[in-house]
Image (cartoon, helix red, strand yellow):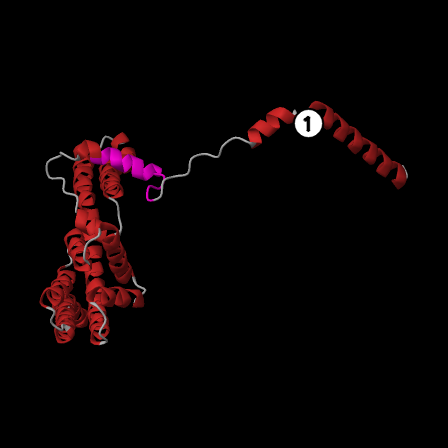
């Protein structure tokens, strides 16, 4: 058996030889080209506000450009702006779901087609699935936008009270709107803060920016605040009572809407509950009926 010292010595010699060969095959780069590479100017940064487009966004924009004039195609820009989605990705989702619904039934029935099953059934099912999935993103977006408008209305009820409190402290209309917007941390308050900040850039009054945001996102409750604050500036009247009254009325409207939704949900449960009761009665009566028929 070879001694351990000889084995370690051989391994050290082999490792040293390997390192020497590696250095000879890969010599150090020349100093001049290396310095030129280090001193190259940095790549131009992406402009602020224009992030690099990902693959889905590029494909979606291509679809928007080529399908913009298609009959029956409607892109809900206000709902998309409210929920923070881009029209490109929305249209890409619609096309992807419709294409998947169109191809899934034929592909899943290929084994049956090999057994000489009729071709018409998979095609019909595929077309129906494509139509249903084409409208599925619209329904999902509509429901999401409805919930977002409800959340914004709840935030506006608090915002109206905050603005009224600032106005009661002899703060100017624009300062009251800015200070009240900085109190909240939700996405609704962030939208209001962005709109008020944009008014400084555009050199317009704050209520004008809120009116633009109302038209962009379809938020009538925000338009009420813009009208009240515009009136306070034009007439010089105190709007504390008006703001508090509008906030109170808005809360009443929200509670009424929630009560109506709860009643509608309760009515939807009536039919399943009645059907379940009928099934229970049939299960209870089934043995007795069978006994009567067999005797």
Would residue 246 be found to the left or right of residue 170 on screen? Answer: left
Q: Quadrant of residue 33?
A: top right
Side of 57 relative to 20 (left or right): left
Q: Which span is picked out in magenta?
A: 49-64
Screen quadrant of the C terminus? bottom left
Q: Residues within 10 Å of mark 1 (few under 14, many from 20)?
A: few
Residue 227 falls within the magenta-colored stretch:
no
Instruction: State the residue in front, 240 or 224.
Output: 240
Magenta span has 56?
yes
Residue located 23% across and 65% down the image: 177
* Vertical arrangement, residue 42 with respect to residue 219, above or below: above
Q: Which residue is mark 1?
A: 28
Residue 157 x/y as whole percent: 20, 70
Q: In x, y percent, where is residue 243?
A: 15, 72
x and y percentages locating residue 230 in the rendered image: 13, 63
Where in the figure is residue 159, as x and y percent of width and height?
Answer: 22, 68
In terms of secondary structure, where does tag 1 sit?
loop
Magenta part mainly helix, strand or loop? helix
Q: Residue furthest left?
A: 235
Residue 166 seen in the current view: yes
Q: Quadrant of the N terminus?
A: top right
The quadrant holding residue 150 is: bottom left
Q: Quadrant of residue 58?
A: top left
Q: Residue at x 21, y 60 (%)?
A: 147
Q: Residue at x 16, y 33 (%)?
A: 120
In this view, 285 is above or below 211: below
Relative to residue 8, is residue 247 drawn left or right?
left
> Total label count?
1
């Amino acid at each position: 058996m070879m001694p351990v010292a000889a084995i370690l010595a051989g391994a050290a010699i082999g490792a040293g030889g390997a390192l020497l060969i590696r250095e000879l095959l890969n010599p150090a780069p020349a100093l001049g080209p290396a310095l030129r590479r280090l001193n190259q100017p940095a790549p131009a940064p992406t402009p602020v506000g224009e992030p690099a487009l990902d693959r889905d966004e590029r494909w979606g924009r291509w679809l928007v450009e080529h399908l913009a004039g298609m009959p029956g195609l409607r892109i809900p820009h206000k709902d998309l702006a409210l929920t923070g989605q881009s029209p490109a990705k929305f249209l890409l989702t619609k096309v992807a779901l419709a294409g998947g619904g169109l191809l899934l039934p034929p592909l899943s029935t290929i084994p049956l087609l090999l057994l000489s099953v009729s071709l018409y059934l998979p095609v019909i099912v595929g077309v129906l699935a494509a139509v249903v999935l084409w409208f599925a993103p619209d329904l999902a977006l509509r429901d999401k936008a409805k919930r977002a408008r409800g959340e914004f209305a709840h935030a506006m009820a608090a915002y109206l009270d905050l603005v009224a409190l600032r106005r009661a402290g002899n703060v100017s209309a624009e300062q009251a709107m800015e200070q009240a917007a900085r109190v909240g941390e939700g996405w609704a308050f962030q939208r209001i803060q962005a709109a008020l900040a944009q008014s400084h850039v555009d050199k317009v009054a704050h209520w004008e920016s809120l009116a633009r945001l109302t038209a962009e996102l379809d938020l009538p409750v925000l338009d009420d605040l813009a009208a009240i604050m515009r009136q306070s500036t034009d007439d010089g009247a105190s709007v504390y009572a008006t703001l508090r009254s509008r906030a109170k009325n808005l809360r009443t409207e929200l509670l009424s809407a929630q009560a109506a939704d709860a009643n509608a949900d309760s009515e939807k449960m009536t039919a399943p509950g009645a059907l379940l009761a009928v099934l229970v009665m049939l299960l209870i009566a089934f043995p007795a009926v069978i006994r009567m028929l067999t005797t």
